[in-house]
Image (tube, helix red, strand yellow):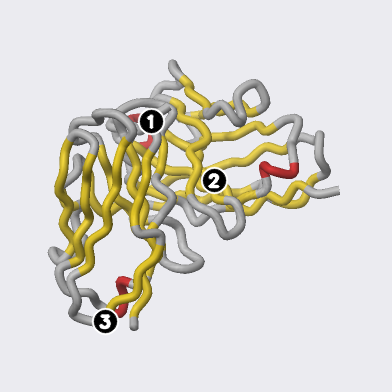
Amino acid sequence: QVQLVESGGGVVQPGRSLRLSCTASGFSFSTYGMHWVRQAPGKGLEWVALIWYDGSNKNYADSVKGRFTVSRDNSKNTVYLQMNSLRVEDTAVYYCAGDYGTNSLVYWGQGTLLTVSS
Amino acid sequence: DIQMTQSPSSLSASVGDRVTITCRASQNIDIYLNWYQQKPGKAPKFLIYAASSLQSGVPSRFSGTGSGTDFTLTISSLQPEDLATYYCQQSHSTPLTFGGGTKVEIK
């Protein structure tokens, strides 16, 4: 069955960096666009980033542009989110999600919690 | 950016009731509109795509309508397991944007 497993969350200080990973199984990962979506505690969903199936195109929310970088390794069925210059307001559960090319988030991971705090 | 506005932000209904949630886009998005269900403590689940197409495995009591700027999600007969927050999302263009969510509670 389809599985997306995020990892790498934790507690970090403002200004530091962290990399999240999301490993996929059960579907043809290399043909799917992959998104990161976050949800601050008690809040709604916020789209963060998209990487096309082949890594050739990437898009970011304005709130993370210049600080976050999305990448993927199709040989490992894994997508990454490198987060630099972290801010308190980046505190959220981060979900990865698979998209078969229509900007529809079909498959979701269980999420990983990032807490940015001094 | 396309803004998505959902209403109401919460509602309480009885089992068997018909429930309707609305979503409005700040500009014409044709039928590029998805709906998601998020149960407490869980990841979102993909329910409806292209405004009215039911994702495989989703119960037929869920339906979606609309095009352009105005959309609705209807639960024809509310069930206890439908306790959740529902989000609309425009798939027209990046940045993808979500509505603020509608929390559905069972009376």
Task: Report which quarter residue B94 is drawn in.
Answer: top left
Amino acid tagged 1:
Ile
A4 w.r.t. B27: above or below: below
The total number of labels drawn is 3
Residue placed under numbered mark 2 in the picture? A38
Assess disc 3: are there few (<14), some (14-19) or many (≥20) residues with their C-alpha within 10 Å of its C-alpha. Answer: some
Assess disc 2: are there few (<14), some (14-19) or many (≥20) residues with their C-alpha within 10 Å of its C-alpha. Answer: many
- What residue do we see at 15% from left, 66% from top? B61
- What residue do we see at 62% from left, 50% from top? A92
Callout 2 secondary element: strand
Residue placed under numbered mark 1 in the picture? B2
Amino acid tagged 3:
Ser
Residue A35: where, in percent of width, then height?
45, 36
Assess disc 1: are there few (<14), some (14-19) or many (≥20) residues with their C-alpha within 10 Å of its C-alpha. Answer: some
The extreme right residue here reads A118
Of A100 and A27, the residue lying toward us: A100
Residue A10: where, in percent of width, then height?
72, 51
Q: Can I make out residue A101 in this image? A: no
Amino acid tagged 2:
Arg
- What residue do we see at 33% from left, 33% from top? B26
Alpha carbon distance from label 1 to label 3: 34 Å
Residue placed under numbered mark 3 in the picture? B14
Alpha carbon distance from label 1 to label 2: 18 Å
